Image (cartoon, rainbow, N blue to C red):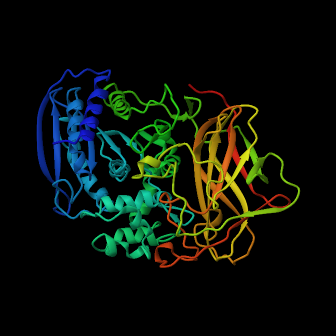
Amino acid sequence: MLTTEEQQELQRVRDEFAKCRVKPEHEIASCTEKMLQMADGVKLRTIIYRTDSRPAAPAIVARTCYPNNDYLYRATAEEYCRRGFHYIYQYCRGTGGSEGVWEPNVNERADGKTTIDWIDAQEWVESIGYCGCSYLALTGWLIADILPEKVKTMYLTHYGTQRFVSAYQDGMFRHDVLTAWTMENAGRPVTADYLKSCLYRPHLEVDEAMWGGKIEWYRDWITSTDADDSYWNSGFWKLLRDIPSRVKVPLYVGEGWYDHHLASAIETYKSLPEECRAKSRFLIGAWNHGFYVKLQDRSGSHYENDDILRAFDWFQELLVEGRTPQREIDYYIIGDDRWYKRERFELERQKELRLHIGAPENGIYALSAQKEAQSQVLGWEYDPENPVMTHGAESLLVTKEEQGSLLQPPPGYRPDVISCISEPLSESVTVFGKMKVTLTVSADVDDTAFAVRIMEVMENGKAYNMRTGITTLGYRNQSSHRQPYKPGEKVTITIDTWDLAWKLQKGSRIRIDLTSTDFPQYSVHSNYAGCWAEKDRVRKAHPQVYFGGENESCLSLPLLEDGNGR
């Protein structure tokens, strides 16, 4: 019996296919199950829907670890079959009736290769399109460079192959992505409180203390804090990172501005060879991991967040109509409700809007095009036992109510949140790319964190987050390994945000909030140097930011100059 939410999701799938330009003129010839044997003898449950289309027809293939979504896979398979496609999906080992032990990631290349080769050998399969979102996209990426002849394209959304980018930001672990996912996919029921789990110290022992036993692969994640650690640069994760550079078939790569895989997916797309990008499409919309538009108090007519029909159209064009795609990159511009189309990822013409932190008025600091003549300082007390909670963010998975662009609290709503606000904009400008906050800082501990939230403040005074960012003294300036820091030392740090396309309206102001935590989007810094997961205690810190005079403390916004789009 499906829940109300599941029934609604099932109806959504049916409703979207009802809009399809290809009508359901075929029948489902058969639905069978096969325990397909892998190279090591383990058998995986494989569900095969065949259409009555003709002796040989295109086949859509997916591999999944989520048996709770079986009702959606079956509905999707039925809709494809009625439109002339075979549809085959398989459960990863240890899940959904497949044999073997569930261990995320590591078996998917070998199992995927065996499976896709078997499908390729079936005489009733004319051609193959691989389809997957999130973990299902991972299973596709892992065979993308070893595809048999019949595989003509892959449709891969909401996943990036640069795993370290998805796990860490300058030493800060992404709890709401990887801790949350681990608790839901531990291979056994985990009923412990999620937030208490994230705050458990030392976090290295949370699995035994709260989750029922060791999870070695999670321990690897939380202790491999350096980008140049061998864990990320050898074996499975290096293989996954390198695969895109060898892909030859046309790809559809889809993402959302508020999907936690965005930064990794951008790096993945950029690593594709030129011959692949020349016939592939990369699209970023205004949605989260589940394709829900996450823009509070905004309405739009061009969100186009229907991934179901977009995927079908892609396969119809390539596998049935035989068309080769042209290179295309599409960005949805928030605040402009339009898509910007281009062929190259890097823009040739961009200018920068730089706003410097300035002297305060009524406790709120300025953001100004002019730098203060005299050096000044601001600061706050950071207590790890009282973190600033995430409200509006791009790198969340399970804390859905805090995803996206949300109405923000008033300036300086906590004593450990320092707000800086600009004058109203004299004209509309479009931010396009990575925003950056540069700060001259010091602290009275050997390591701590600096977090930033960038907002548009509308003429009515309501502020909505655009992007967040975070860094640490230990990993300042995107260092790939931990750096020493001497308490009291004055250093310059840079906080980069993820890419964004956002039109700031004439009359709006720009606001940034400076603080030290953004939990549970990121782990809470203990204010001690060393591996965060091994710390069993915390202490207070007193970060300081210097501005004016010789100090460089400012916000830099990359602006779009080319107005072409659709």
- In the image, is residue 214 above or below residue 54? below
Task: Please indicate, yes or no, whether residue 461 appears anywhere in the rendered image.
Answer: yes
Quadrant of the image occupied by residue 110 = bottom left
Measured as percent of width and height from the top left, residue 67 is found at 22, 50
282 vs 457, left or right, is left
Q: Residue at x 73, y 31 (%)?
A: 427
Viewer-proximal residue among 462 and 47: 462
User: How many numbered dots are placed on residues in this image?
Assistant: 0
Q: State the image coordinates of residue 141 (x, y, percent, origin top left).
A: 38, 50
Q: Position of residue 392 (x, y in %)?
A: 52, 48
User: Which residue is at a point 42% across and 67% down the rendered structure image?
Assistant: 221
Quadrant placement of the C terminus: top right
Query: Does 219 sit left or right of 340 as displayed?
Result: left
Compared to 263, does 178 lie above or below?
Answer: below
Q: Position of residue 535 (x, y in %)?
A: 49, 77
Is 302 or 7 nearer to us in this picture? 7
Which residue, as the protein is rendered here, is positioned at the far front?
362
Q: What residue lies at 39% left-to-right and 72% top-to-bottom?
A: 219
Residue 527, quarter of the rendered image:
bottom right
Above/below status of 304 relative to 422: above
Return the residue nearer the eye: 524 or 342. Answer: 524
Q: Can I make out residue 126 in this image?
A: no
Quarter of the figure with the N terminus: top left
